[in-house]
Amino acid sequence: PSPRSCQPNGTNKEALQYEIKELKQKDLALDQEIAQLLSEGYSLEELEKHISLLHEYNDIKDAGQMLLGKLAVIRGVTTKQLYPEYDLELSD
């Protein structure tokens, strides 16, 4: 294909420019949030550790949800019906 055929048309170009503008705004907002946290005394290492722990928590929670789902299928009930049996709140 010619270089011209790879060029986005006007509508696509405008959409890409809008998306770039939004991403730059999000980047700025995140930079400001990081600066705020740093000014409150958090360190980058602490923030990175916290994020890592959140990922680990989410992975464990996902595995638990998967196991509850499989158990519910085996028992022929909904996962919601299993929550009281394991002292779980619906918000867990």
Image (spheres, grey):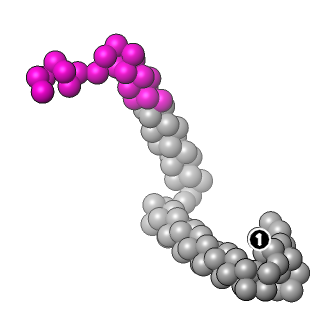
In the image shown, does 76 or 16 lie closer to the viewer? 76
Please state which amino acid type lies under the numbered disc 1: Asp
Q: Answer whether residue 33 is magenta in the image.
A: no
Image coords of residue 20 (percent x, y): 40, 29
Lateral position of residue 60 relative to residue 14, left or right: right
Secondary element under disc 1, as helix, strand or loop, is loop
Of residues 27 and 70, the one drawn nearer to the viewer in this rendering:
70
How would you rate the neighbour count of disc 1 (Cα within 10 Å): few for under 14, some for 14-19, many for 20 or more? few
Q: Residue furthest top?
A: 10
Up the image or down, 14 lies above or below 73; here it is above
The C terminus lies in quadrant: bottom right
Q: Which residue appears at 64% of the width and 77% of the height? A: 66
Residue at the outermost left position? 2
Snapshot quadrant of residue 10: top left
Which stretch appears magenta? 1-22
In the image: residue 50, left or right of residue 66: left
Residue matched to label 1 = 92
x, y percent for residue 72: 76, 80
Res. 70 in view: yes
Image coordinates of residue 61 in percent, x first then y, are: 64, 75
Quadrant in the picture for residue 87: bottom right
Q: Residue at x 56, y 58 (%)?
A: 41
Dividing the picture into quarters, in which one does residue 2 lie? top left
- Residue drawn at the location 70% of the way across and 77% of the way down: 69
Number of numbered markers: 1
Image coords of residue 1 (percent x, y): 12, 27
Compared with 14, 52 (above or below) is: below
Q: Residue at x 80, y 81 (%)?
A: 76
Depth order, front residue of 55/29? 55
14 sits to left or right of 3: right
Q: In this orientation, which residue lies closer to the viewer: 70 or 63? A: 70
Q: Is residue 46 visible?
A: no
